[in-house]
Amino acid sequence: MARMTPSEAFVETMVANDVTVAFGIMGSAFMDAMDIFTPAGIRLIPVVHEQGAGHMADGYARVSGRHGVCIAQNGPGITNFVTAIAAAYWAHSPVVCITPETGAMTNGLGGFQEAQQLPFFETITKYQAHVPRPERMAELTGRAFDRAIQENGPTQLNIPRDFFYGDIDVEIPQPIRIERGAGGENSLNEAADLLAAAKNPVILSGGGVVMSEGVEQCKALAEYLGAPVCNTYLHNDSFPASHELWCGPLGYQGSKAAMRLISQADVVLALGTRLGPFGTLPQHGMDYWPKDAKIIQIDCNSKVLGLVKKISVGICGDAKAAASTLLDRLQTRDVACLATKAERAENIAAEKASWEKELDEWIHEKDEYSLDMIEEQAGEEGSYLHPRQVLRELEKAMPEDAMVSTDIGNINSVANSYLRFEKPRSFFAPMSFGNCGYALPTIIGAKVAAPERPAISYAGDGAWGMSMVEIMTCVREQIPVTSIVFHNRQWGAEKKNQVDFYSRRFVAGELENPSFAEIARSMGAQGVTIDKLEDIGPALKQACDAQKDGVTTVIEIMCTRELGDPFRRDALSVPVRHLEKYKDYQ
């Protein structure tokens, strides 16, 4: 055991876990430890707002496969982490949220920047460690890092600010990394039997395939079976889009080809997915989830097996190992669907071609409100572009190996149909937590983890306003990214509900904004405004090229006020008013 201060024990434990980057805002609560970050090889990237730091840690973790770390001042600095940690929780992202708190001897007295910090994160972390004595600093720091990886999610390390000081004898714990297996023998055999007997199997490739580095194993299994592969909602990078068996994502604004093909399945292999409710809901007027198919669900968390969808076989195992093991077992069985591989391949190709043709021809939304907006804006000064055309042009111009983050909102959701990737750890979205202000800080963290890759964020003007200040972080810290802002002057997703249910009574949905390109320039970045379709591709290429020179660019694209489908039509009801004063509001 070595003699050191708790600050040294804390920092050395982070070093043992290969931490080289942390995101946050400096504070006196952890300054004694922060003072030795640099000689320890840890870069603290200062942000504008702590929520941004949490999202950056999330993006860093999702690209690197290692811990993302965020840290801030006790009290208000820590409460600003909450939204980002909740997003990381639903993204299964191994973020370690370090929360210095009020000193142990004054806790409960209502002092400066005091808060009870553990309850804030109780339901949005996989593990919480509170350091009760300085002597346990290294032990609990190590455990917070271990649990984040073991349980695929954020953890909290809560440290009284006075516990960084003193002298302790300590041994720095070495990281514990567990090896996950393919699952139980009986359940694997049952799954192999179902797949062998299937006439029309379909694979649903989820986030667990990405996290387990199992894309190649998923691909090998799909190729052997000739099975179409659908991406789970917002995991468009879980199977290569150029592959002939790729069909696109399910869920909101997903691929009709994927939906039609999975609706025809007699066996679905849900690989590395919790089958979350938002990714299996009806869409495009299609209730596509197969009612009579046998469902095999594989996830490393046994608690989600059969939680949302009824399943035939549940396997608690690693997606990569399970896919490899199932392929081995199938190769020793008679597999019924092998006789129809060519016929099914033709069906897959035809469904994909039909969907691509529909996307090519789907220039704008065709509902009554959108047509009214298109006509109205045609008479306004300036040019406004159809969002679907914009998204198609961005797709065509997307550089190879690009990383893309999307915010929440109407145009961002429509983008789900147009975002295609060749490799995992390329696509990041706020998942089912659905918070605004996600895309920009997350792609900044992703860029720190993979500085050689083009980094692009998508946001609508409403969501953009919540995080655009982090452009200053890009400029100050020389972290170059490209941010696409769809400027349509409205909170589109919620405004769509006012169109569908509230007779176009718009309350708080309209946004009159300044030029976001000008704001970007004022923060030291490049700013470009686009109002011609032919300028989109060249602008994206130039902005991504500028990243190589350390330049951040904001591309503001002027869009019409048309609106795509809502998130869920069953989420609201036609209003009923009983009071006379409100009779006209139904």
Image (tube, rainbow, N blue to C red):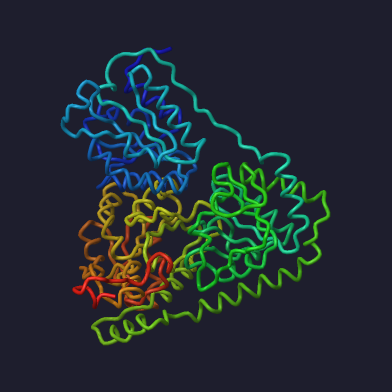
In the figure, is residue 495 to the left or right of 217? left
Q: Nearer the viewer, residue 8 or 173?
A: 173
Residue for point 77% across, 62% down:
337
Is the N terminus in the top left, top right, bottom left or bottom right quadrant? top left
Q: Which quarter of the picture shows residue 154?
A: top left
Residue 532 percent coordinates (x, y): 35, 78
In the figure, is residue 580 to the left or right of 440? left
Q: How many marks?
A: 0
Q: Nearer the viewer, residue 31 or 264?
A: 264
Q: Which quarter of the picture shows residue 381?
A: bottom left
Is the C terminus in the top left, top right, bottom left or bottom right quadrant? bottom left
Q: Nearer the viewer, residue 503 or 553?
A: 503
536 up-or-down from 524: above or below: below
Residue 161 percent coordinates (x, y): 25, 26
531 up-or-down from 302: above or below: below
Residue 506 percent coordinates (x, y): 25, 73
Residue for point 25% across, 29% down:
31
In the figure, is residue 63 to the left or right of 178? left
Residue for point 50% across, 51% down:
425
Residue 390 percent coordinates (x, y): 40, 73
